[in-house]
Amino acid sequence: MLHVDPISVATPAAPLLTAVATGPAATEVTASAGALAAEAAPPPFSVTAVVTEARLDSWLAVGLVLAAGLYLYGVYRLRLRGDRWPVARTIFFLGPGLGGIASVTVSGLHAYDTTLLSVHMVQHMVLSMVSPIFLALGAPVTLALRTLPTGPRKRLLAVVHSRIARVYTFPLVAFAIFVVNPFALYFTDLYRYTLEHTWAHEVVHAHFIMTGCVFFWPLLGLDPLPGRWPYPGRALLMLLSVPFHTVLGLTIMQSTTLFGGDWYPSLGLSWADPWEDQVLAGGILWAGGEFVSVTMLAVLVVQWMRQAEREARRIDRELDRQEARQRAAESTA
């Protein structure tokens, strides 16, 4: 299926052509540009359009397929030598993890991410908050350490425990990056720039994923990362992130200016109101952020309780061993 990216609709191509041609030619060129814009604009947003506008030719789709293939190959290698790998980890990594990224970038939603701010916010939520959680639960670094040869394993450990990794995965640093990034994007001219340039828009998608992984991996992940905080500190940091989404969502909903300037009105979509869509986008960010944060807090509490139970069982076993040694010593005496 031939897909025309809506980013190209509002580029300066039409004004440039008009400036070059004058008189009747200018009128003809302007009419042609307007017809092209109307034809290239995506159809009204619907479930059918999300399916029919799917795209499988992006670099991100190739990266997702490659990541899934490498993960499954690692699981296959473990099973060949008789080792177990939890099925839940594979499901988390491939399903909500990589599958979540694909659902908002490879599906037809991508055709609307520069047309509707609300769709962009859905992408923002999934790429930075939902998928990174399940990627972390998939423990891909642990899988790689268990399957790689000695040389690559040592190099991977060196990267994981490097000074750069220690700085960026330190919970306070990761929290600051996670909180500041959306404000730096939406309240500056950077957001308009990403709408006008396809490559910048794709970089923002990758940046969302990386930011989410840097924040959630040390909090929830199972991989051996340096500088990991105890569970009370992790729960407190997750609790502090709750007001951030409320403030950002309400600010977007109550803003008296359109994000992206005149970008959305210039598309001339008869089936979408940019102002109403911006209010919806703020509501999505507010409600979605609250839901994910509270859910994450609950997951951390459950993990904390399980760790306490494992520690209690370990202490009980140690006490049993000490008692057995004492009885043996008394019997010998």
Image (tube, rainbow, N blue to C red):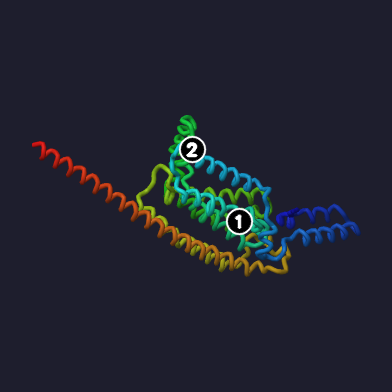
Residue 320 % position (x, y): 21, 46
Q: Nearer the viewer, residue 209 or 263?
A: 209
Residue 108 seen in the figure: yes
Which residue sits at x=73%, y=65%?
A: 268
**In-image side of 287 versus 65 (left or right):** left
**Horizontal side of residue 298 vs 96, given as left or right:** left
Per the image, label 2 sits on a secondary structure element best described as: helix
Instruction: Give the residue pinned by disc 2.
Output: 80
* Image quarter of residue 126: bottom right
Q: Amino acid at mark 1?
A: Val
Could you say which quadrant of the image residue 295 lies in? bottom left
Residue at mark 1: 104
Residue 121 rendering spot, x and y as whole percentages: 58, 60
Q: Residues within 10 Å of mark 2 (few under 14, many from 20)?
A: few
The foreground one among 315 and 126 is 315
Q: Image point 45% across, 32% down: which residue?
A: 154
Q: Quadrant of residue 182?
A: bottom right
Q: Residues within 10 Å of mark 1 (few under 14, many from 20)?
A: many
**Do we see residue 163 in this rendering?**
no
Residue 267: x and y, percent? Answer: 72, 62
Query: Which residue appears at 64% of the width and 56% of the height?
Result: 107
* Residue lying at 49% horizontally and 32% vertically, measured from the top left: 152
The disc placed on residue 82 is: none
Direction right: furthest residue: 24
Structural distance between the alpha carbons of marks 2 and 1: 35 Å
Q: Position of residue 188 (x, y in %)?
A: 59, 56
* Residue type, mark 2 in image: Leu
Q: Pick whichever of labels 2 and 1 is earlier in the sequence.
A: 2
Name the element at disc 1: helix
